[in-house]
Amino acid sequence: MKESLIQQKSFDFALKAIPLYKDLLAKNEFILSKQFFRSATSIGANVKEASAGFSKKDFTAKMGIASKEARECYYWLELIEAGNFSEFPLLELKEENQRIIRILTAIVKTCQTNL
């Protein structure tokens, strides 16, 4: 079975999050780095888990969790940026995160309508 667009985008996003995570660790910023990285990788994990959902309701719930994780990740990116915790270029990560949020929002809304 071919991977869905959101599975690929969320996986790619997690990979792109690694350099920022490493940069924060190198600066001894352990709390923000962990919070950011957990939410960044959780998006794809929940999307992947949704693909094995037992029902449409289960699929919708897992995609809803992925959407919440994406929003949490965006919060951490904003905090990292506002607090000047890293010189890492955040614009691309923030834009990709926003695209993922829009896709997940559309998926969840469509699923809720079809339940």
Image: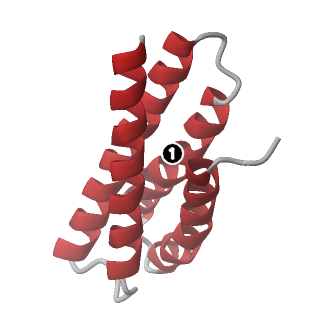
Residue 33 appears at what percent x and percent y? 44, 62
Residue at position x 48%, y 31% from top?
63
Left or right: 30, with 10 as reference point: left
The quadrant in which the C terminus is found is: top left
Instruction: Give the residue type that dot 1 points to.
Output: Ile
- From this viewpoint, is residue 74 visible? yes
Residue 85, placed above or below residue 70: below
Residue at position x 39%, y 79% from top?
92
Q: How is the image coloured?
A: secondary structure
Q: Nearer the viewer, residue 37 or 59?
A: 59
Residue at position x 50%, y 72% from top?
25
Q: Quadrant of residue 47?
A: top right
Identify the element where label 1 is drawn: helix
The quadrant in which the N terminus is found is: top right
- From this viewpoint, is residue 90 visible? no
Left or right: 90, with 13 as reference point: left
On the image, numbered disc 1 is attached to which residue?
A: 43
Residue 74, placed above or below residue 23: above
* Total marks placed: 1
- Tell me the crowding category of disc 1: few under 14, some 14 to 19, or many 20 or more residues within 10 angstroms, Cα based: many
Residue 102 appears at what percent x and percent y? 33, 51
Residue 115, placed above or below residue 13: above
Residue 61 appears at what percent x and percent y? 46, 20
Residue 96 appears at what percent x and percent y? 41, 67
Q: Nearer the viewer, residue 2 or 100?
A: 2
Question: Which residue is farthest front?
Answer: 114
Q: Nearer the viewer, residue 48 or 30?
A: 48
Residue at position x 31%, y 65% from top?
77
Left or right: 53, with 28 as reference point: right
